[in-house]
Amino acid sequence: MRPSEETIEAWRLMLQAHQRLTTQMDQELRKRHGLQLDWYDVLYQLHDAGGRMRMHELAAATLFSRTDCTRLVDRMERVGLVQREPAAEDRRGVYAVATAEGQALFRRAAASHLEDIQQLFGAHVTADEAKAMAEGLGRAIQAGEG
């Protein structure tokens, strides 16, 4: 069954909005904090998880492949934002852990990033529209996981 014209247009606009908004947010984070958006995402996920996550969980949460997540954490580790710790309960397991420097950078960047979300996205949709988008996108994500 072919999707409706409205569905095709919504799909196209979702992809276009994602590309443009993430590019703008990346530029703002780099300019204000010297932090790229994918690094912010890693620090956010670690913050949300209490400061540490297993590498495979981090990859899933950030939507990076395991290989890409490993490379990203390698780069962040070299500049002192994260470190790896072996999992005591599993010799093969490894945790990514936000360093004090990484946690501080995340805290500094979070407020301006939230302002960017509001300015670049939230100011252009109503609360009802945002709720409808979140519900529809959430259902699409769940269907894709099943």
Image: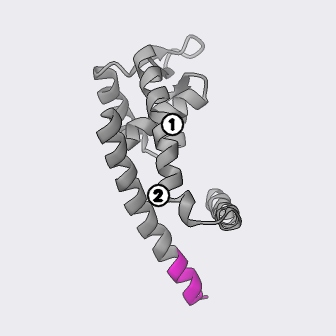
Q: Nearer the viewer, residue 146 or 14?
A: 14
Task: Report crowding for label 2: few under 14, some 14 to 19, many 20 or more residues within 10 A (C-alpha).
Answer: some
Magenta stretch, residue numbers: 1-10
The mark found on residue 134 in the picture is: none
* Label pair 2/1, CB-CB below 8 angstroms: no
* Residue depicted at x 48% and y 14%: 86
Task: Report crowding for label 1: few under 14, some 14 to 19, many 20 or more residues within 10 A (C-alpha).
Answer: few
The residue singled out by tag 1 in the image is 111
> Is 42 left or right of 61, judged from the image as shown?
left
Residue 135 painted magenta: no
Q: Is residue 128 above or below residue 42?
A: below
Identified by mark 1, the residue type is Ala
Question: Which quarter of the rendering shows the C terminus?
Answer: bottom right
* Residue depicted at x 33% and y 18%: 80
| Residue 40 position by quadrant | top left
Instruction: Give the structural element (helix, strand or loop) at label 1.
Output: helix
Q: Point out residue 16 in the picture as x, y percentages from the top left corner.
A: 41, 69
> Is 89 left or right of 42, judged from the image as shown?
right
The residue singled out by tag 2 in the image is 120
Q: Is residue 98 above or below residue 5?
A: above
Q: Point out residue 74 in the picture as x, y percentages from the top left corner.
A: 32, 27
